[in-house]
């Protein structure tokens, strides 16, 4: 899986999901991807985060993690 984000005209972060990480679940999403989102938002507080309704994005653990990070 390839994860990336868009930030206007800037280059943005991306992540290639490693096979040894196995399948994507909400716990792994919070470990690998949410910190990237947090870093982007902390450097650019004007950003709005938008995600689709994938189960890992809408899971309670993900929503709680992002809420605690003020994302």
Image (cartoon, grey):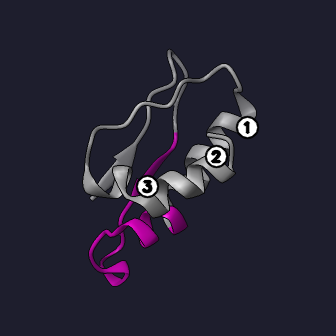
**Magenta stretch, residue numbers:** 13-31
Q: Which residue is mark 1?
A: 42
Query: Dot 2 corresponds to which residue?
Result: 38
- Quarter of the image where the C terminus is located: top right
Residues 67 and 46: in front is 67
Instruction: Name the secondary structure under disc 1.
Output: helix
Q: Quadrant of residue 64?
A: bottom right
Judge by depth and name the residue closer to the eye, 69 or 40.
Answer: 69
Kindly report the distance in space between the C-alpha atoms of the residues bearing marks 2 and 1: 6 Å
Whether label 2 touches label 1, CB < 8 Å: yes
Dot 3 lies on which element? strand
Residue 15 disc label: 3
Q: Nearer the viewer, residue 42 or 10?
A: 42
Identify the residue at horizontal 43%, vertical 59% (top origin). Answer: 60
The span from disc 3 to disc 1 (Cα, nearest Å) is 18 Å
Using the numbered discs, state the Cα–Cα distance from disc 2 to disc 3 in whole angstroms: 14 Å
Q: Considering only order in the chain, which callout, 3 or 2, is on the residue closer to the N terminus? A: 3
């Amino acid at each position: 899986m390839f994860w990336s984000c868009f930030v206007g005209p800037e280059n943005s972060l991306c992540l290639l999901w490693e096979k040894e990480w196995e399948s994507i679940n909400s716990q792994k999403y919070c470990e690998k991807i949410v910190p990237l989102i947090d870093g982007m938002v902390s450097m650019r507080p004007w950003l709005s985060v938008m995600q689709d309704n994938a189960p890992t994005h809408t899971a309670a653990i993900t929503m709680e993690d992002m809420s605690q990070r003020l994302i």
